[in-house]
Image: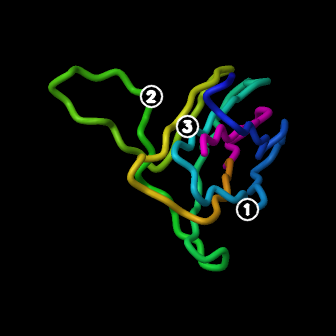
Amino acid sequence: MSKYAEKITVIDEKTATFTSAAINIEDAEKVVLVCNRADHSSGSSAFTAQVSVDGTNYIDYKKWISNANNTNAQGLTRVTTLTLSSNTTDFLTMSPEDGFKDIKVKVTETTDGTHSAWLFIQR
């Protein structure tokens, strides 16, 4: 059985700046955002998210745990944005102590590219 109960496509091969519809993440134990950039010639794709506790008011989420290299002496690297500047895939994990009702994912395109993103949600 998969550790993740849900895989939700939030951005599906968009070729311009785009914001997803709100996705319910209420009662999620773990939320992972996987982002992909394809068809790269130049520029970048910057992935961000906004979260809400009431489904109406949204704020920028600034505590993503980055998939960055660090040493055991360093703490987790927390970021607001995942920027991809080549044909690649990377991911961010939401801080496990945080809980929200909804999330919206946005990609901001600079120059070109095809952008996709998925949420993996464990409840």
- Prevailing secondary structure of the magenta residues: strand
Point out residue 92 in the picture as x, y percentages from the top left corner: 51, 37
Disc 2/disc 1 C-alpha distance (Å): 24 Å
Residue bearing mark 3: 83
In magenta, the rendered stretch is 108-123
Label 1 element class: loop
Residue bearing mark 1: 22
Viewer-proximal residue among 74 and 81: 74
Inspect the magenta stretch and tell me whether residue 80 lies in it. no
Which residue is rendered at x = 76% and y = 55% of the image?
A: 20
Residue 59 vertical position relative to residue 82 in the rendered view, above or below: below
Disc 3/disc 2 C-alpha distance (Å): 12 Å
Q: Is residue 38 left or right of residue 108?
A: right
Which residue is rendered at x = 57% and y = 27% of the image?
A: 90
Label 3 element class: strand
Disc 3/disc 1 C-alpha distance (Å): 21 Å
Viewer-proximal residue among 52 and 12: 52
Q: Sequence order check: which comes first, mark 3 or mark 1?
A: 1
Inspect the magenta stretch and tell me whether residue 120 lies in it. yes
Point out residue 114 in the picture as x, y percentages from the top left corner: 80, 33
The three-letter amino acid code for the residue at tag 1 is Ala
Q: Sequence order check: which comes first, mark 3 or mark 2?
A: 2
Residue lying farthest to the front in this orientation: 1
Residue bearing mark 2: 67
Point out residue 44 in the picture as x, y percentages from the top left corner: 63, 35
Q: Is residue 98 left or right of residue 109?
A: left
Q: Is disc 3 in contact with disc 2, using a CB cutoff of under 8 Å?
A: no
Which residue is rendered at x = 36% and y = 43% of the image?
A: 78
Residue depth check, mark 3 versus mark 1: number of the one nearer the observer: 1
Residue depth check, mark 2 versus mark 1: number of the one nearer the observer: 1
Q: Is disc 3 in contact with disc 1, using a CB cutoff of under 8 Å?
A: no
Q: Sequence order check: which comes first, mark 2 or mark 1?
A: 1
